[in-house]
Image (spheres, rainbow, N blue to C red):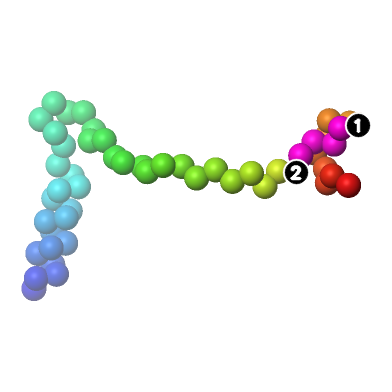
Amino acid sequence: MPSSDAAMAKFNSLKSTPADGRPQLVDLGMPVFTDDTPSPRPDTGEPGLQD
């Protein structure tokens, strides 16, 4: 079956390590930051809704 051959090839590639024994680098991509925190209130410094 071709799918079992592909699965075994993937499994073997995952368990193989570089010759120097260090783990391979993984690209995690760029993080996305969202600012959902309300601005601090000027009278208390606590987060809250601005009027």
Q: Which residue is mark 1?
A: 43
- What is the quadrant of residue 45 in the picture? top right
Q: Is residue 9 above or below residue 43?
A: below
As for residue 18 lying within the magenta part, the answer is no
Tell me the residue at 9%/64% (across/down): 5
Q: Quadrant of the rendered structure where residue 37 is?
A: top right
Q: Residue at position x 83%, y 46% from top?
A: 49
- Which residue reaches farthest right? 43
Query: Residue 4, image x and y in percent?
Result: 13, 67
- Secondary structure beneath dot 1 equals loop
In the displayed structure image, the side of residue 36 where residue 20 appears, left or right? left
Q: Is residue 12 above or below residue 44?
A: below
Expressed as whole percent of the image width and height from the top left, the position of residue 21 reads: 17, 28
Q: Does residue 40 show up magenta in the picture?
A: yes
Magenta-highlighted residues? 38-42
Q: Amino acid at mark 1?
A: Asp
* Disc 1 residue crowd, few under 14, some 14–19, many 20+, Cα 10 Å: few
Residue 2 in the image, given as x and y percentages of width and height: 9, 71
Q: Main secondary structure of the magenta part?
A: loop
Q: Is residue 14 above or below residue 42?
A: below
Residue at position x 13%, y 26% from top? 20
Q: Residues within 10 Å of mark 2 (few under 14, many from 20)?
A: few
Q: Which mark is residue 38?
A: 2
